[in-house]
Image (cartoon, coloured by chain):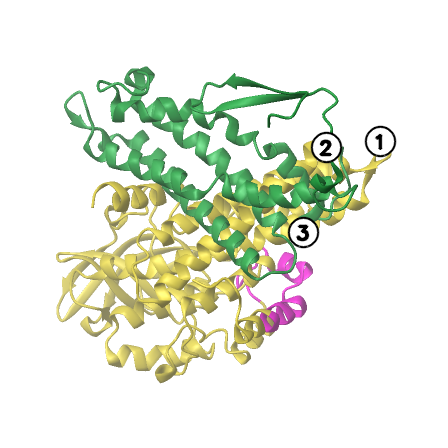
Chain colours: A yellow, B green
Amino acid sequence: MDLDLTEEQQMVIDMTRGMLAEHSTTAIVRDMEDDPKGYPEALWKQMGELGLNGLLIPEAYGGGGQTLLEGAFVYEELGRAMAPTPHFVSCVMSAGVLLEAGSEDQKQAWLGRIANGDAILTPAWLEPQRSFGEAGIALAATADGDGFKLSGRKRLVAYASSAERLIVLARTKAGVDLFLVDPRAKGVQMKQLLSQGREAQYQIDFTDVKVSAADRIGAPGSGWQTWHKVMLQGITLLAAQAIGGAARCLEETVVYANQRVQFDKPLGAFQALAHYMADASTRIDGGRVLVHEAAWNHAQGRSIERFGPMAKLFCCETYRETTRVCAQIWGGVAFTIEYDQQMFFRRAKALQLSWWDGPYLEELIAQDVLDK
Amino acid sequence: MDHPGLEVQSLPTIGKDTTNQVFFENVFVPDEYLVGKRGRGFHMISEALDLERFTMFTLSPIANRTEVLVDWVKKAKRDDAPLKDDPNVRRTIAQIVTDTAVAKGLSTRFVCAAKSGGKPPTIESSQYKLFTTTLSQRVCKDALDIQGHEGTLMEGQEDAPIMGRFEGAYRATMNETVGGGSSEIQKNIIARRHLGLPKNF
């Protein structure tokens, strides 16, 4: 793997950072916290115009056909800017599921519209008191004539209020299946739940919601396999997002540590504080290589069963720990809403607990290392 | 080394190496033995240390210990059950394997910076050394924790797990976070040269 960026890769990074500097300022990010919609139209429109929404979707379906490595560069920038966007749920996870297992009709119907930002899709995955694993899927899809009836509760369905379709993970006789469900269908009820990351999160209740057989994605019982495969790609991008957040949090802290004087010295001249920052920078720079290695391996067509989980495990802990030590350096002001530090602090922990948490990732790594 | 006035005393260590202290008693050194320009000695040794930090603490023995531990855990049993099924052991192994991959990443970063020429890769070597030597000690500590009471059996004995490899390595790696510039020195270097923080000592 070559660590040097190509000119095109550097262009993608610069373009994304420039756009986010205008459309995802901390004032805009604050404004979107707890908002029922959760993302600004201007940002979403810009992302579409720059081709970021279709970045990972093949050209044949109206996307840019880029690899996970380009995706990682973009996600580091989205993490830096704490960008409030449904990009991950729609353009990565939902598009990923359709690409992996969708019928040609399903792909034609949705991928182009996801790529240009016209349609937002979001997965409905997690359930109360249930795990991240396959056994966590309990929402029942029972046979009903030619189709199915769905009943159960889903949580942490991000940006559901803007979704044209939900991708629901449900339990059928065959195992776990994925269904495209219209959130306006009879029997669907959603309620916003506030969360630590303050993005638009919904709880959705399904009561005998009718779904046609044509809306199942993939062969019967293949849902979990599809989901797992797409998740490996998704968590690699979230690891990049974590590195971006950690890097910016540290950069702002370094600036502050150079300016703020205490006992006649800048804060950064105190070794106890400087060493926190040196440790954080080492973890950030090391974690970034791991993310790129995971993404590069995927782009080369190799398995990322180990690299993906390792990248998310390490980078999310790096983000969390960086925000913890940076708060020590800022002191009491980091605890106030007025300063931006708390925004990184909350998001770091929320990201670590979402989309496979530490123990789940550790077990995936252990399986790959010890059980094969 | 047989110069008049030069005395070498060996100092055995708890690792395998022996170190030395060297005494100089009015040792005459002719001008032609001066290395480089006068007054530039510390600068030159600092550059040499950038390389030492990488070459003295190369990744291969550290990554190799991670592999040896993984192979042992895969086969070991405790109370007749596979040790690898112990959730604490699984978690520890996942963390070690992940951090070893990060150490490899930091080593790749150093090599890329070194081959591009220009400035010596000071920051990359400090980050690599800081992270990797800390990890190296942790792998040995975790290995002994996994082995439990059998971990105390001293290196070189058939009856010790993996011939006492980690008992020996636990002792031998003690100096890694000191030699070639301690972890604290590496953090000072990273803080000043990489992050641009003020001089702090």
| Same chain? Circles 1 and 2 | no
Residue at 62% in and 38% down: B186
User: In the displayed structure, would residue A284 be above or below residue A333?
Assistant: below
Residue position marked by numbered label 1 in the rendering: A263
Residue at 25% in and 23% down: B161
- The amino acid beneath tag 3 is Glu
Q: Chain of mark 1?
A: A
User: In the displayed structure, would residue A308 be above or below residue B67?
Assistant: below
Quadrant position of residue A367: top left
Circle 2 residues within 10 Å: few <14, some 14–19, many ≥20: few
- Expressed as whole percent of the image width and height from the top left, the position of residue A129 reads 33, 41
- Expressed as whole percent of the image width and height from the top left, the position of residue A200 reads 50, 58
Q: Main secondary structure of the magenta part?
A: helix
Counting labels gives 3
- The amino acid beneath tag 2 is Val
| Label 3 or label 1, whichever comes before in sequence order | 3
Residue position marked by numbered label 3 in the rendering: A251
User: In the displayed structure, would residue A331 be above or below residue A252?
Assistant: above
Numbered label attached to residue B29? 2
- The amino acid beneath tag 1 is Phe
| Same chain? Circles 3 and 1 | yes
Residue at 62% in and 48% down: B123
Label 2 to label 3: alpha-carbon separation: 49 Å
